[in-house]
Amino acid sequence: MTTTATDTEDSGAHPRFAEALRELGLEGLEVRRFPDATRTAAEAAAAIGCELSQICKSLIFAADGVPVLVLMDGASRVDVELVRQELGAEKVTRAKADVVRETTGYAIGGVPPFGHRNRTRVLADRSLLDHDVVWAAAGNPHAVFPMEPKDLVAHAGATLVDVRERTA
């Protein structure tokens, strides 16, 4: 099912995210809703029919206890040591589920790259720019939307960085 953000009730986009789209002037953005949850990047890629690396994961970390959003391609893992260095923090850990919900207003598996309850620092891994289009969660585990990576990075207010875990 493909709808636009103006059909908020039907689109499957979380109401807070639909409101963020309106505020950003993105009312016509396509939102796809799936009957089965797409909580993981692999589930989302399979449902959409795209490459795993075309999924934009929105991950919350705690840098010295302060929430930070990291946008990462679906095929890669975040190197927390690189995030720590990038932020000049002493310690970076994956945020617990309650911190993710408190910070963003969304549950893990549905966190979008922008439209959060609280403003946080945002880092976007450069690997997202390898694609013409990436797909991200629209506020819940059943809805996603496509966007050009450079636009997604801009709307998220992200700083481009290299924080992808390197494989040997």
Image (tube, grey):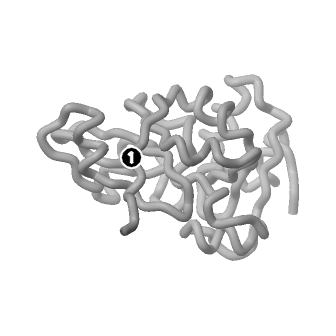
Tell me the kind of residue under disc 1.
Val
Residue at the extreme front of the image, as rendered: 168
- Pinpoint residue 19: horizontal percent, then vertical percent: 67, 33
**Residue under label 1:** 163
Quarter containing the N terminus: bottom right
- Pinpoint residue 46: horizontal percent, then vertical percent: 71, 74
The residue closer to the viewer here, 127 or 140, is 127
- Pinpoint residue 14: horizontal percent, then vertical percent: 64, 48
Residue shown at 42% from the left, 42% from the top: 162
In this figure, what is the number of numbered marks? 1
- Pinpoint residue 49: horizontal percent, then vertical percent: 78, 69
Quarter containing the C terminus: bottom left
Residue shown at 49% from the left, 39% from the top: 124
Residue at the extreme left of the image, as rendered: 90
For label 1, the SS is: loop
The residue closer to the viewer here, 115 or 166, is 166
The residue closer to the viewer here, 82 or 69, is 82
- Which corner quadrant of the image does residue 123 belong to? top left
Relative to 122, residue 165 above or below: below
- Which corner quadrant of the image does residue 113 belong to? top right
The residue closer to the viewer here, 67 or 133, is 133
Residue shown at 48% from the left, 43% from the top: 125
Relative to 114, residue 94 above or below: below
For label 1, the crowd category at 10 Å Cα-Cα, with few meaning under 14, some 14 to 19 and many 20 or more, is: many
Residue 102 located left or right of residue 73? left
- Which corner quadrant of the image does residue 87 belong to? top left
Residue shown at 55% from the left, 47% from the top: 127
